[in-house]
Amino acid sequence: MDESRQWVEFGRWLVEQREERGLRRRDAARKAKISEALWRDLETGRKEAIGGIRLLPNPSQDVLERVAAALELPVEDVLARVGRAKAGRRSLGPADAPKGDDDGSLLSIKLRRLSDRDRILIERLIDAMLEHEDR
């Protein structure tokens, strides 16, 4: 299934879930602590950009977790609906134990979950930010 179709189907499912709980869009968005416009984008499977161009939604995992919480659904169910089942939160296991200079913070845990390529990119970004700050 192509990605645009997946978002449309997710939107239909999201509407069903919201309506089953007797929530209006505004109330669901407020409960999730996101804008009503963002919730609408998720339900329609697209968002309007400048010049009327339609884009696919690309919500962060945090937004999807808030949506799940607002609808009292397991996060994994919501993530699976948008093809992000593997990106879901997992329970901490031995691989998540602090290592070396790692302080066990949430940031450290998230960094360990990144690919080597992405970790290097983040490290370079942080180095550049620190270098800029030192000037």
Image (cartoon, grey):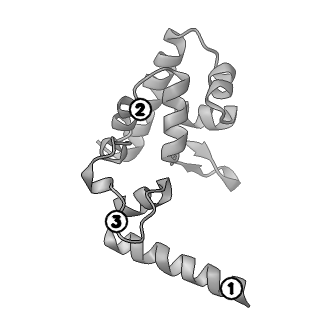
Classify the position of the C terminus by image quarter.
bottom right
| Circle 3 residue | 99
| Circle 2 residue | 75
Q: Is residue 134 left or right of residue 62?
A: right
- Looking at the rendered structure, the secondary structure element under dot 2 is helix
**Residue 66, visible in the rendered structure:** yes
Instruction: Please identify, in this view, whether the residue under mark 2 or under mark 1 is nearer the observer.
Output: 1
**Amino acid type at image mark 2:** Val
Determine the CA span between mark 3 and mark 2: 28 Å
Write down the quadrant of residue 32 in the picture: top right
Counting from the top left corner in percent of width and height, residue 27 is at 67, 20
- Looking at the rendered structure, the secondary structure element under dot 1 is helix
Counting from the top left corner in percent of width and height, residue 33 is at 66, 33
**Which of the two discs, 3 and 2, labels the residue nearer the N terminus?**
2
Looking at the image, the residue that sits furthest to the left is 94
Q: Which of the two residues, 81 or 49, is positioned nearer the viewer here?
A: 81
**Amino acid type at image mark 1:** His
- Residue placed at 41% from the left, 32% from the top? 75
Classify the position of the N terminus by image quarter.
top left
Counting from the top left corner in percent of width and height, residue 7 is at 43, 38
Number of numbered tags placed on the structure image: 3
99 to 110, vertically: above or below: below
Q: Is residue 94 left or right of residue 124?
A: left
Write down the quadrant of residue 110 in the picture: bottom left
**Residue 45, visible in the rendered structure:** no
Find residue 31 and name its label.
none
**Amino acid type at image mark 3:** Lys
Q: Are marks 3 and 2 in contact (CB under 8 Å)?
A: no
